[in-house]
Amino acid sequence: MMARFRWLVLFLIVSSTFNNLSVAQIPGFPEDGLSDRIEFWEKVFTVYGEDDLIIHDAQRVDLIYAVVDERSRRSGVQSVRNLLSEVRSKISSPNQLTTEARRLYDMIEADGVRMRAGDIAVLQGRIHVQRGIKERFRAGIIRSGRYLSYFEEVFESESVPTVITLLPLVESSFQNEARSHAGAAGIWQFMPSTGRQFMRVTRGRDDRLNPAIATRSAARLLRGNYEVLQSWPLAISAYNHGRAGMARARRAHGSDMATIVGNYSSRTFGYASKNLYAEFIAAVNVYNNYEVHFGPIALDSPMDFTAPATRIARAPLNGTGGQTYRVRSGDTLGTIAVRHGITIDRLMNLNSLPTDLIFTGETLVVAALDGADAAEVAANGEYRVRLGDNTLSEIAELFGMRLQELINLNGLRGSTIYAGQILIVR
């Protein structure tokens, strides 16, 4: 029943918290046209807990109909659906609505929805349930203390804004062992196909679970997104929707994120993709004011990222193009440079080495491909075959395609490939 919904108490909590909180915008990360969406996610992170299910509109996310618990999920959604049906049937005579239906009518009207039967029917088809994550978000802030100083160092070295190191608050709550039902893993929630472009993801070794390697990979992925899309909001959104997908969105609607969220239509540009950038901004806002929301918090102590096991992350391990060499006992940068006909400075630059210290077992790039990084997928959905790509089936697996689908898409007569070949992927 609607009487079980917790309207007033939560409204007062939300109002008292957010009406008194002023948050400065982050330079280079505009919020224009997204303030309602960002505020909704701030509430999800700080007001609504794991027992709160928010019944709201999937597009106008701040249009919250009710808040229920798990036991009332089904009945709550049905009650909202019934009330919307009543509003729709009496749209021209709102004075005949029941008290609860009239409250819903007034709420919808205040949110700027055109009060026509067809528009209410659209709302009926967009009912969404979002669980609050207040407890999880607070725990993520605590865990962030282990990683942020090192993550910021990595991002700065890769020319990526250090504020984006807070994206794991949204992706994984800084849980290194986090895994999603879709197959994403680690702090940065790399899918297997994307992860293989930057690191080793095999049955015997999954570098997505190595925070140092995964962070270097995330920085390079984000930088590549930006180089193609020329917008950090789009680059962050591409972390979920893909670089080619956001390039299509930009071609259709320009680079304004609010315009894209409001107007871009794609089968795969759904709730998660539309909200990632707003979630990120909300997460940054909450993190920068976490004592206001959660009171004093003691963050975890920073981890030691100087050990050889994590130093490996300074060099690309797989999928970055070029020839690699695995360091053996007794090797020095000088002997490796002479063996491969390059200078020590070139070797250090290729591997982003701050000193000449190397470790046995470390993989170093000793020769890079000419031109742009061959691992990058172009904005038009093309892929340039790299040195080291062994079979067409491996490339199909990389992009979640069937081998025959990849062959048909490119009009290939067989499975022979060669370095530099351009393949259409999806």
Image (cartoon, rainbow, N blue to C red):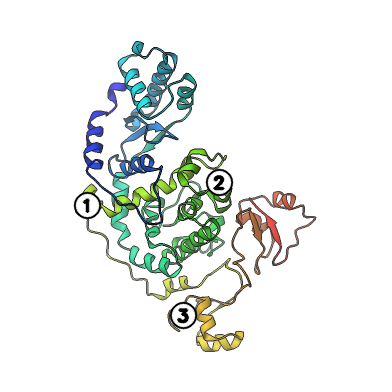
Residue drawn at point x = 32 percent, y = 67 percent: 303
The answer for how far apart the CA atoms under marks 1 and 2 are is 37 Å
Instruction: Let me know if residue 141 appears in the view.
Output: yes
| First of labels 3, 1 by sequence position | 1
Q: Is residue 142 above or below residue 267?
A: below
Type of the residue with mark 2: Ala
The residue wearing badge 3 is: 359
Estimate how packed mark 2 is, as few (under 14), some (14 to 19) or many (20 or more) residues with alpha carbons within 10 Å: many
Residue drawn at point x = 41 percent, y = 42 percent: 33
Q: Nearer the viewer, residue 279 or 180?
A: 279
Type of the residue with mark 1: Glu
Q: Nearer the viewer, residue 355 or 60?
A: 60
* Element on which disc 2 rests: helix
Residue 291, disc = 1
* Element on which disc 1 rests: helix
| First of labels 1, 2 by sequence position | 2
Q: Nearer the viewer, mark 3 or mark 2?
A: 2
Q: Are marks 1 and 2 in contact (CB under 8 Å)?
A: no
* Element on which disc 3 rests: loop
Q: Nearer the viewer, mark 3 or mark 1?
A: 1
Q: Is residue 86 found left or right of 269 in the rendered image?
A: left
The residue wearing badge 2 is: 249
